[in-house]
Amino acid sequence: MIKVVFLGFGNVNSHLLNALNKNTEISVIQVFNRNYIKLISSFEHIQFTDDISKIAEADIYIIGIPDDAISRFSESLAFQNKLVVHTSGGAAMKVLSSKNRRGIFYPLQTFSKHRKVDFKEIPICIEAENPNDLGLLRKLGETISENVVEISSEKRAKLHLAAVFVNNFVNHLYEIGSEILNEEDLPFDLLKPLIAETASKIKTLSPEEAQTGPAKRNDKKTIEKHLHLLTDSPHAKLYKLFTEQLNQKYGKEL
């Protein structure tokens, strides 16, 4: 049985705890958080501590805190030669203190509080300094996911960059769409079937094959009409930028 301690209890670690706690091959023995938190009733059997000197013995320590705090926090850990990993997509493995065996356990997904996710479909990106630790991380990942993949810190940084484009930036575009509809007292629900179909298409089509719209087909009248509607809007610049990039991509001039 793999013994796990969670260090920090933000969105990622709380979702990981929920997934790993259900597995008979894993024993989550402790959660550490600098600020006191009351674990939900289903986790009451798990020890909690806010005292860094009382962190329990485990096979794997999973750090789930903001990227800029990982290095200092990992250096402050009292123990040595243990397998310590972090869950960040953007931070390199080397930001972890070298006094412990370093690794990565990065679930590639967006996590929101109170929203359940299916870990079976979530890619778990792993990395470690030695083969035994890599094997242990793979075993841990495979208890919850059907897609565990070894990826270097350099490649993971690019993967995280791509994830920001397809998740965070796309969600911001949803916000813009919602704002435009709100100005006309139209519900955002009108766009949800379109959003769902757009996401569904890439399961069978490449992004290039799935691309549609006035910019791709060089529909100048529609583009001009949209820009007119965006007069004095802060979103006009973004509309022009996307349109110009799509025109360049598909070889059509405005």
Image: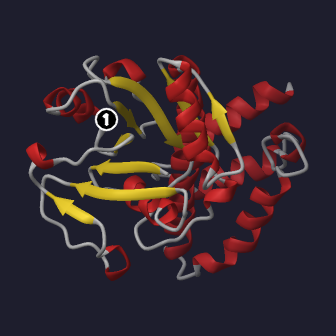
Where, by quadrant of the figure, is residue 117 drawn? Answer: bottom right
| Spot occupied by residue 213 in the image (x, y as percentages of width and height) | 81, 50
Task: Pick the residue in front: 218 or 87.
Answer: 87
Is residue 253 visible in the rendered image? The answer is no
Task: Pick the residue in front: 88 or 136.
Answer: 136
Q: What's the residue at 38%, 49% (across, down)?
A: 4
Check disc 1 and report the residue beneath it. 67
| Spot occupied by residue 132 in the image (x, y as percentages of width and height) | 53, 25
Where, by quadrant of the figure, is residue 27 drawn? Answer: bottom left
Q: Is residue 67 left or right of residue 20?
A: left
Q: The C terminus lies in which quarter of the figure?
A: top right
| Spot occupied by residue 170 in the image (x, y as percentages of width and height) | 58, 50
Task: Pick the residue in front: 77 or 70.
Answer: 77
Task: Pick the residue in front: 199 or 70.
Answer: 70
Badge count = 1
Q: The disc labelled 1 sits on which kind of residue? A: Asp
Q: What's the residue at 42%, 53% (across, down)?
A: 12
Label 1: few (<14), some (14–19) or many (≥20) C-alpha neighbours in 10 Å: some
* Image vertical order of residue 182 relative to residue 58, above or below: below
Q: What's the residue at 29%, 76% (across, down)?
A: 44
